[in-house]
């Protein structure tokens, strides 16, 4: 008489529902959001805005959200995403009339930091501002971009080329 019992339709329906929900959870589409990418190479010190970026759809959580209108702390290659760590406030741009040069910087220097450049074998000191982070290569020279006042720029460049200049960064 077991053959005459009705099939367990309720259990089959619940099992099918559980299987369908688990498949939907596994294969559901990721939520997408817009994120800016560089159209062309964006030089350090340039304002990053809608004129030099384009937005592309990326999965939520891929990148930290960024706010356009800030200054690029480092050079951003064409096609790369604009990351939160690439941007700084307006204070990271070189002051008007100052000259920028690449020099070895102390660890931990950040764009916008006030600095002094001491020219060894002389009594000269030049005011400076860190424009770009030192490179992250542990085997590299730790060079970064520094802006120097125009009047002292030739002396600083000469001393830096000869290895006679040291950058001191003020603590934040």
Image: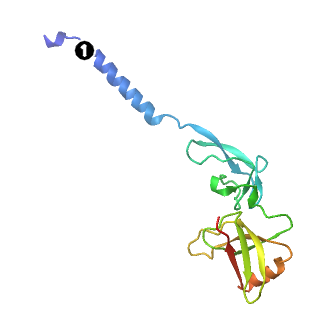
Tag 1's secondary structure?
loop
Residue 165, percent across and down? 72, 82
Determine which residue is flagged by label 1.
7
Total residue callouts: 1
Q: Residue at x 74, y 90 (%)?
A: 121
Residue 172, percent across and down? 65, 64
From the viewer's perspective, tell me whether residue 64 is left or right of residue 151. Answer: left
Q: Looking at the figure, which quarter contains the N terminus?
A: top left
From the viewer's perspective, tell me whether residue 23 is left or right of residue 82. Answer: left
Farthest residue to the bottom: give it: 121
Farthest residue to the left: give it: 1
Q: Is residue 142 above or below residue 63?
A: below
Q: Residue at x 40, y 31 (%)?
A: 22
Q: Nearer the viewer, residue 69 or 17?
A: 69
Q: Quadrant of residue 8?
A: top left
Q: Nearer the viewer, residue 160 or 25?
A: 160
For the residue carrying disc 1, how many other residues have a C-alpha within 10 Å: few (<14), some (14-19), or many (20+)?
few
């Amino acid at each position: 008489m077991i053959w005459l019992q009705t099939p367990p339709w309720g259990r089959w329906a619940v099992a099918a529902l559980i299987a369908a929900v688990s498949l939907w959870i596994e294969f559901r589409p990721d939520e997408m959001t817009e994120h800016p990418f560089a159209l062309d190479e964006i030089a350090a010190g340039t304002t990053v805005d809608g004129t030099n970026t384009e937005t592309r759809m990326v999965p939520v959580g891929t990148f930290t959200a960024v706010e356009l209108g800030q200054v690029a702390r480092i050079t951003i290659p064409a096609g790369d995403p604009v990351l939160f760590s690439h941007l700084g406030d307006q204070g990271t741009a070189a002051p008007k009339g100052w000259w920028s040069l690449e020099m070895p910087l102390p660890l931990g220097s950040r764009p916008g930091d006030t600095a002094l450049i001491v020219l060894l074998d002389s009594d000269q000191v030049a005011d400076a501002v860190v424009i770009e982070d030192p490179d992250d290569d542990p085997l590299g020279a730790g060079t970064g971009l520094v802006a120097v006042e125009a009047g002292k720029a030739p002396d600083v460049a000469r001393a830096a080329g000869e290895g006679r200049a040291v950058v001191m960064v003020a603590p934040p």
